[in-house]
Amino acid sequence: MSTETKYSLEPNNWVKNYADFLFNYTVTRVNNHEQAKDLVQETFFSALKAAENYRGQASERTWLISILKRKIIDHYRKINSKKGKAELKVNFYEEGDKKGSWLEERVPQLWDNKVENDIENTELKDVLNKCIDNLPDKYRTVFILKNVEHFQTEEICNEMGITSSNLWVIIHRARHQLRKCLEDNWFAK
Amino acid sequence: MSKKFIINCDEATTICNKSQYKEASFWEIIKLRYHIFSCKLCRTYSKQNATVTKICSKHLHKTNKKYKLCKEEKELLQTEVIKKIKDKH
């Protein structure tokens, strides 16, 4: 081991020093208080197990966040294999002559011309937030990271353990659902 | 993305969504424009999609709000961590 080792671990102080930081990081990515809390706890447990392998090259905080990031990726893999896939409605024919064409019931309806005036409306904001909340977890997270946090595509792919084509499929489906939801709950009223 | 010039509505709307983040390539935009020229549904979608983007940039903002665990949650977490530390030794 190198003699230049700078950092050391103080597990007794982890909760005091990092719990809030790790929790805040997690909750913006999983959007659920209890799940975020569990992931933080699992991170501390895994870190304790792996403590012998800590070489002190990265700060304690950086090391913990790298463990947490893997936990979040695993979390998404888990929920993705369980559910999440079937929750979004299909918008296009998936096979046959019409493959890739709009399904009749999913065709975009015309919105009236006052749309532009509505954009500022704060009630529309509430509808938007409800529509975003209705997205499956993974879709919502990707959408938020892209639209609100303005992450680069590559950053999101690294954080979520997905490829860029996965990401665009997710954005594609999320935006379709969002457009439809805004249509049903606002523009078509 | 394939090199073919004629794309279907699914592919067209995918490019349209990508373009909302300025991440569609030049060639993709050409294909999208050509498709939209002849497809009324995707023309409608494309227009509405731009509106969705406007609504999002108007109403969705990064908050500086920091999420925290409450005191009890932290105490419980601390107890669990200490228990694990003791188990180890």
Image: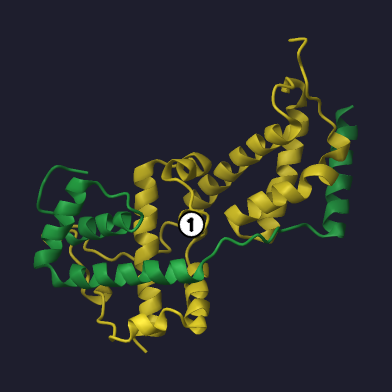
Query: Residue A138 or A94: which is nearer the viewer?
Result: A138
Q: Residue furthest bottom?
A: A189
User: Taking the image as drawn, is residue B45 in sight?
Assistant: yes
The image shows residue B84 at horizontal and vertical percentages of: 84, 37
- Name the chain under label 1: A
- Is B79 on the left-hand or right-hand side of A132? right
User: What SS does tag 1 mark?
Assistant: loop
The image shows residue A109 at horizontal and vertical percentages of: 26, 80
The image shows residue B55 at horizontal and vertical percentages of: 42, 72
- Is A12 on the left-hand or right-hand side of A57? right
Q: Which chain is yellow?
A: A
How many discs mark residues in the rendered view? 1
Q: Around disc 1, counting alpha carbons within 10 Å, would you say few (fewer than 14), some (14 to 19), or many (20 or more)? A: few
Query: Residue A34 or A81: which is nearer the viewer?
Result: A34
Residue A119 sits in which quadrant?
bottom left
The image shows residue A123 at horizontal and vertical percentages of: 51, 84
User: Taking the image as drawn, is residue A94 in sight?
Assistant: no
Query: Residue A99 or A26: which is nearer the viewer?
Result: A26
A182 is higher (above) or lower (below) than B34: below
Q: Residue at x 36, y 55 (%)?
A: B21
Q: Residue at x 48, y 57 (%)?
A: A83
- Is A117 on the left-hand or right-hand side of A108? right
- Is A184 on the left-hand or right-hand side of B64? left
Query: Residue A168 or A58: which is nearer the viewer?
Result: A58
To which residue does mark 1 refer?
A83
Q: Which chain is green?
A: B
